Image (cartoon, rainbow, N blue to C red):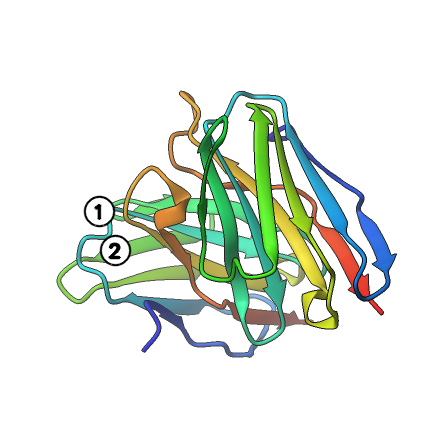
Protein backbone atom coordinates (compact mmCIF):
# COMPACT_ATOMS: atom_id res chain seq x y z
CA UNK A 1 0.00 0.00 0.00
CA UNK A 2 1.34 3.44 -0.89
CA UNK A 3 1.98 5.89 1.91
CA UNK A 4 -0.15 8.52 0.16
CA UNK A 5 -2.97 7.52 -2.13
CA UNK A 6 -5.08 9.55 -4.48
CA UNK A 7 -7.79 8.62 -6.92
CA UNK A 8 -6.02 9.17 -10.25
CA UNK A 9 -9.23 10.09 -12.05
CA UNK A 10 -9.54 11.48 -14.58
CA UNK A 11 -12.33 13.69 -13.38
CA UNK A 12 -14.18 15.25 -16.29
CA UNK A 13 -16.58 17.97 -15.21
CA UNK A 14 -18.47 20.83 -16.91
CA UNK A 15 -17.68 24.43 -16.19
CA UNK A 16 -19.37 25.61 -13.03
CA UNK A 17 -19.40 22.19 -11.40
CA UNK A 18 -18.19 21.44 -7.91
CA UNK A 19 -15.59 18.70 -7.64
CA UNK A 20 -13.87 17.12 -4.67
CA UNK A 21 -10.67 15.12 -4.39
CA UNK A 22 -9.58 12.99 -1.49
CA UNK A 23 -6.15 11.88 -0.44
CA UNK A 24 -5.45 9.26 2.22
CA UNK A 25 -2.21 8.84 4.11
CA UNK A 26 -0.96 5.97 6.23
CA UNK A 27 1.61 7.55 8.55
CA UNK A 28 -0.10 8.92 11.64
CA UNK A 29 3.06 10.93 12.47
CA UNK A 30 2.42 13.19 9.49
CA UNK A 31 2.48 16.83 10.48
CA UNK A 32 1.97 19.05 7.45
CA UNK A 33 -0.27 18.73 4.45
CA UNK A 34 -0.41 20.53 1.13
CA UNK A 35 -2.15 20.53 -2.22
CA UNK A 36 -0.10 21.25 -5.32
CA UNK A 37 -1.25 21.87 -8.86
CA UNK A 38 0.70 20.68 -11.88
CA UNK A 39 -0.01 21.67 -15.45
CA UNK A 40 1.12 19.51 -18.34
CA UNK A 41 4.91 19.62 -18.77
CA UNK A 42 5.26 22.15 -15.96
CA UNK A 43 6.55 22.01 -12.43
CA UNK A 44 4.23 21.41 -9.46
CA UNK A 45 3.16 24.62 -7.78
CA UNK A 46 1.78 25.09 -4.30
CA UNK A 47 -1.98 25.55 -4.38
CA UNK A 48 -2.60 25.70 -0.66
CA UNK A 49 -1.55 24.36 2.68
CA UNK A 50 -4.08 22.33 4.65
CA UNK A 51 -4.72 23.35 8.22
CA UNK A 52 -6.34 21.32 10.96
CA UNK A 53 -9.34 23.62 11.12
CA UNK A 54 -9.82 23.61 7.37
CA UNK A 55 -9.08 26.56 5.15
CA UNK A 56 -10.47 28.31 2.14
CA UNK A 57 -8.90 30.32 -0.66
CA UNK A 58 -11.49 31.70 -3.03
CA UNK A 59 -13.16 28.77 -4.78
CA UNK A 60 -10.85 26.24 -3.13
CA UNK A 61 -11.46 24.61 0.24
CA UNK A 62 -9.05 22.20 1.90
CA UNK A 63 -9.86 20.01 4.88
CA UNK A 64 -7.94 17.63 7.09
CA UNK A 65 -9.35 14.67 8.97
CA UNK A 66 -6.62 13.34 11.24
CA UNK A 67 -8.78 10.63 12.77
CA UNK A 68 -9.47 9.07 9.38
CA UNK A 69 -6.12 10.18 7.94
CA UNK A 70 -7.27 11.95 4.83
CA UNK A 71 -7.21 15.39 3.31
CA UNK A 72 -9.62 16.77 0.78
CA UNK A 73 -9.76 19.54 -1.80
CA UNK A 74 -13.05 21.04 -2.93
CA UNK A 75 -13.23 23.21 -6.03
CA UNK A 76 -16.40 25.21 -6.51
CA UNK A 77 -17.58 26.86 -9.73
CA UNK A 78 -14.94 25.06 -11.83
CA UNK A 79 -13.20 27.04 -14.55
CA UNK A 80 -11.54 25.78 -17.71
CA UNK A 81 -8.28 27.01 -16.23
CA UNK A 82 -8.65 24.60 -13.30
CA UNK A 83 -7.80 21.72 -15.64
CA UNK A 84 -4.60 20.25 -14.23
CA UNK A 85 -3.26 17.46 -12.07
CA UNK A 86 -3.65 17.96 -8.32
CA UNK A 87 -1.05 16.43 -6.03
CA UNK A 88 -1.41 15.97 -2.32
CA UNK A 89 1.69 16.12 -0.17
CA UNK A 90 2.12 14.76 3.32
CA UNK A 91 5.12 15.84 5.36
CA UNK A 92 6.51 14.36 8.54
CA UNK A 93 8.79 17.27 9.28
CA UNK A 94 10.61 20.31 7.96
CA UNK A 95 12.77 18.26 5.64
CA UNK A 96 10.95 17.32 2.48
CA UNK A 97 13.03 14.19 2.47
CA UNK A 98 10.34 13.16 4.85
CA UNK A 99 7.55 14.33 2.54
CA UNK A 100 5.59 12.03 0.29
CA UNK A 101 3.74 13.04 -2.83
CA UNK A 102 0.62 11.38 -4.10
CA UNK A 103 0.61 10.40 -7.77
CA UNK A 104 -1.99 13.06 -8.52
CA UNK A 105 -5.60 13.39 -9.62
CA UNK A 106 -6.25 14.68 -13.11
CA UNK A 107 -9.07 17.17 -13.59
CA UNK A 108 -10.45 18.27 -16.94
CA UNK A 109 -13.04 21.02 -16.96
CA UNK A 110 -15.04 21.15 -20.18
CA UNK A 111 -17.09 23.99 -21.67
CA UNK B 1 9.07 33.17 -7.98
CA UNK B 2 11.08 31.02 -5.60
CA UNK B 3 14.40 31.84 -7.25
CA UNK B 4 15.26 28.38 -8.58
CA UNK B 5 16.93 27.81 -11.91
CA UNK B 6 17.80 24.49 -13.49
CA UNK B 7 20.25 23.86 -16.28
CA UNK B 8 20.21 22.52 -18.85
CA UNK B 9 16.47 22.58 -19.42
CA UNK B 10 16.66 20.03 -22.22
CA UNK B 11 19.38 17.54 -23.04
CA UNK B 12 19.78 14.54 -25.29
CA UNK B 13 22.71 12.30 -24.48
CA UNK B 14 24.00 8.88 -25.43
CA UNK B 15 23.95 5.79 -23.27
CA UNK B 16 27.06 5.51 -21.15
CA UNK B 17 27.96 9.18 -21.08
CA UNK B 18 28.08 11.19 -17.87
CA UNK B 19 25.51 13.94 -17.38
CA UNK B 20 25.33 16.68 -14.77
CA UNK B 21 22.24 18.71 -14.02
CA UNK B 22 22.57 21.91 -12.04
CA UNK B 23 20.15 23.53 -9.65
CA UNK B 24 20.76 27.06 -8.43
CA UNK B 25 18.76 28.92 -5.78
CA UNK B 26 19.00 32.51 -4.71
CA UNK B 27 16.99 32.60 -1.47
CA UNK B 28 19.16 30.70 1.00
CA UNK B 29 16.89 27.69 1.47
CA UNK B 30 18.45 25.05 3.68
CA UNK B 31 17.09 21.99 1.90
CA UNK B 32 17.49 21.08 -1.74
CA UNK B 33 16.12 18.05 -3.55
CA UNK B 34 16.23 16.23 -6.84
CA UNK B 35 13.11 14.41 -8.01
CA UNK B 36 12.32 12.54 -11.16
CA UNK B 37 8.82 12.24 -12.57
CA UNK B 38 7.69 9.49 -14.87
CA UNK B 39 4.25 8.43 -16.10
CA UNK B 40 2.70 5.98 -13.66
CA UNK B 41 5.19 6.75 -10.89
CA UNK B 42 4.57 10.31 -9.88
CA UNK B 43 7.35 12.29 -8.23
CA UNK B 44 10.15 10.20 -6.76
CA UNK B 45 12.94 11.56 -4.60
CA UNK B 46 16.44 10.81 -5.85
CA UNK B 47 18.69 12.61 -3.36
CA UNK B 48 18.38 15.54 -1.05
CA UNK B 49 20.65 17.89 0.85
CA UNK B 50 20.18 19.45 4.26
CA UNK B 51 23.24 21.67 4.13
CA UNK B 52 26.57 22.23 2.42
CA UNK B 53 28.23 18.84 1.91
CA UNK B 54 25.34 17.13 3.72
CA UNK B 55 23.35 14.86 1.45
CA UNK B 56 21.25 11.74 1.75
CA UNK B 57 19.63 9.21 -0.52
CA UNK B 58 16.02 9.17 -1.56
CA UNK B 59 13.96 6.27 -2.80
CA UNK B 60 15.52 5.99 -6.30
CA UNK B 61 19.18 6.93 -5.78
CA UNK B 62 20.87 4.08 -7.69
CA UNK B 63 22.83 5.42 -10.66
CA UNK B 64 22.85 8.99 -9.35
CA UNK B 65 25.21 11.04 -7.24
CA UNK B 66 24.91 14.58 -5.90
CA UNK B 67 27.10 17.31 -4.55
CA UNK B 68 26.47 20.53 -2.72
CA UNK B 69 29.61 22.59 -2.26
CA UNK B 70 27.72 25.88 -1.84
CA UNK B 71 24.38 26.69 -0.28
CA UNK B 72 23.00 27.87 -3.59
CA UNK B 73 24.04 24.99 -5.87
CA UNK B 74 23.00 21.35 -5.93
CA UNK B 75 24.34 19.14 -8.69
CA UNK B 76 22.90 15.84 -9.86
CA UNK B 77 25.24 13.55 -11.78
CA UNK B 78 24.42 10.49 -13.80
CA UNK B 79 27.78 8.76 -13.93
CA UNK B 80 26.86 6.61 -16.93
CA UNK B 81 23.48 7.44 -18.35
CA UNK B 82 21.06 4.63 -19.23
CA UNK B 83 17.82 4.72 -21.17
CA UNK B 84 15.88 4.10 -17.94
CA UNK B 85 17.09 7.49 -16.76
CA UNK B 86 15.18 9.25 -19.51
CA UNK B 87 12.86 11.41 -17.49
CA UNK B 88 12.03 14.91 -16.37
CA UNK B 89 14.07 15.98 -13.38
CA UNK B 90 12.83 18.58 -10.93
CA UNK B 91 14.95 20.38 -8.41
CA UNK B 92 13.13 21.60 -5.33
CA UNK B 93 13.93 23.70 -2.27
CA UNK B 94 12.48 24.24 1.16
CA UNK B 95 13.43 25.44 4.59
CA UNK B 96 13.69 29.19 4.58
CA UNK B 97 12.80 31.42 7.48
CA UNK B 98 9.85 32.72 5.49
CA UNK B 99 8.44 29.64 3.79
CA UNK B 100 9.17 26.94 6.37
CA UNK B 101 8.67 23.43 5.00
CA UNK B 102 6.79 24.46 1.87
CA UNK B 103 8.47 22.93 -1.17
CA UNK B 104 9.14 24.98 -4.31
CA UNK B 105 10.10 23.41 -7.61
CA UNK B 106 12.29 24.47 -10.47
CA UNK B 107 10.95 24.35 -14.01
CA UNK B 108 12.42 20.94 -14.74
CA UNK B 109 15.14 19.44 -16.89
CA UNK B 110 14.04 17.10 -19.68
CA UNK B 111 16.67 14.42 -20.22
CA UNK B 112 16.58 11.91 -23.06
CA UNK B 113 19.12 9.08 -23.12
CA UNK B 114 19.42 7.43 -26.52
Q: Earlier in the sequence, mark 2 or mark 1?
A: 1
Q: Tell me, yes or no, whether dots 2 and 1 are on the same chain.
A: yes
Q: Is residue B3 above or below residue A111?
A: above
* Mark sitting on residue A52: 1
Give the x, y percent position of residue B6.
Answer: 72, 39
Q: Can the viewer see residue A81 in this picture?
A: yes
Assign a secondary structure to mark 2.
strand
Q: Residue at x 50, y 29 (%)?
A: B53
Question: Local crowd at mark 1 within 10 Å, few (<14), some, or many (≥20)?
Answer: some
Image quarter (top left, top right, bottom left or bottom right) of the N terminus of chain A: bottom left
Residue B8 occupies quadrant: top right
Q: Residue at x 40, y 44 (%)?
A: A96
Q: Label 2 to label 1, Cα distance in Å?
A: 6 Å
Furthest-left residue in this view: A67
Residue at mark 1: chain: A
Residue A57 occupies quadrant: top left
Determine whether, in the image, residue B74 is placed left or right of residue B87: left
Question: Local crowd at mark 2 within 10 Å, few (<14), some, or many (≥20)?
Answer: many
* Mark sitting on residue A64: 2
Q: Is residue B25 above or below residue B87?
A: above
Amino acid sequence: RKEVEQDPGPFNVPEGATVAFNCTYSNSASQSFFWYRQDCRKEPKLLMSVYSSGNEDGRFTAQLNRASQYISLLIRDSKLSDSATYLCVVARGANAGKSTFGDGTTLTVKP
Amino acid sequence: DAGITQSPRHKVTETGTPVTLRCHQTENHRYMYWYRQDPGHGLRLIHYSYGVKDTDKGEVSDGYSVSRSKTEDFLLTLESATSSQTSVYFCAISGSAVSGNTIYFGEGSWLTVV
